[in-house]
Amino acid sequence: MMRVWVLPMLLVLCGSLVATGQYLQGNPRVAAALLPVFVLLAGVTSPLIFPRSIGALEAQQRSAADGRPIVFWRPGCTYCLRLRIRLGGAAHRLHWVDIWRDPDGAAAVRRANEGNETVPTVVVAGRPHTNPDPAWVREQLQPRPAKDADSHPAP
């Protein structure tokens, strides 16, 4: 749990130190501008921007029931952040698994990526896709038209 907050805490600490240094050098405006930038960076690299993570087993059960994709991610991953931001509000319709919190999730990612913990790994209908395009992931959330038996010609 602690390691997911290391990068955000370091960013806030470094930002505080840089801002303090600028303030002490007589640059209060620079200090006032830098500190919010570091706090913002800490926020987007923290788990706070992502929907609540669940365990891999629970995500697999839910995905089997509702057909929604599973996203395996970790805090601090810029590709995960890119996916999350580009999905916008649709991100809440996926099942998110933080591999740093869930050993089963990390194992699932390693199985899908030749032993590597490459994220984001998105599982759609049981098939893993490593670092897919966010537009493609959004398409996977669209309801599929029902296949009508009468619409297909008989062989």
Image: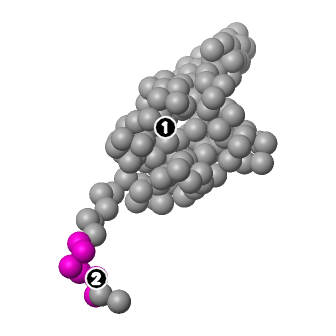
In the rendered image, the quadrant that contains the C terminus is: bottom left
Specify the label residue 60 is tagged with.
1
Q: Which type of secondary structure does the marked residue at label 2 adopt?
A: loop
**Pick the front one: 34 or 2:** 2
> Which residue is drawn at the image coordinates 47% and 29% (left, top)?
58
Sequence-first disc among 1 and 2: 1
Residue furthest front in the image: 155
Query: Which image quarter: residue 5?
Result: top right
**Pick the front one: 109 or 29:** 109
Query: Which image quarter: residue 17?
Result: top right
Magenta-colored span: 148-153
Quickly name the residue at label 2: 152
> What type is the residue that disc 1 sits on?
Gln
Q: Please provide percent x and percent y for residue 115.
A: 78, 42
Residue furthest right in the image: 115
Q: CA distance from mark 1 to mark 2?
A: 32 Å
Residue 86 falls left or right of residue 20: left
- Looking at the image, is 100 positioned above or below residue 90? above
Q: Please provide percent x and percent y for residue 54.
A: 48, 26
Residue 149 falls left or right of residue 113: left
> Which residue is drawn at the image coordinates 23% and 80% (left, top)?
151
How busy is the neighbourhood of tag 2: few (under 14 within 10 Å), some, or many (20 plus)?
A: few
In the rendered image, the quadrant that contains the N terminus is: top right
How busy is the neighbourhood of tag 1: few (under 14 within 10 Å), some, or many (20 plus)?
A: some
Residue 32 falls left or right of residue 21: left
Query: Which image quarter: residue 36?
Result: top right
- Looking at the image, is 114 positioned above or below residue 20? below
| 152 inside magenta stretch | yes
Residue 11 appears anywhere in the view: no
> What type is the residue that disc 2 sits on?
His
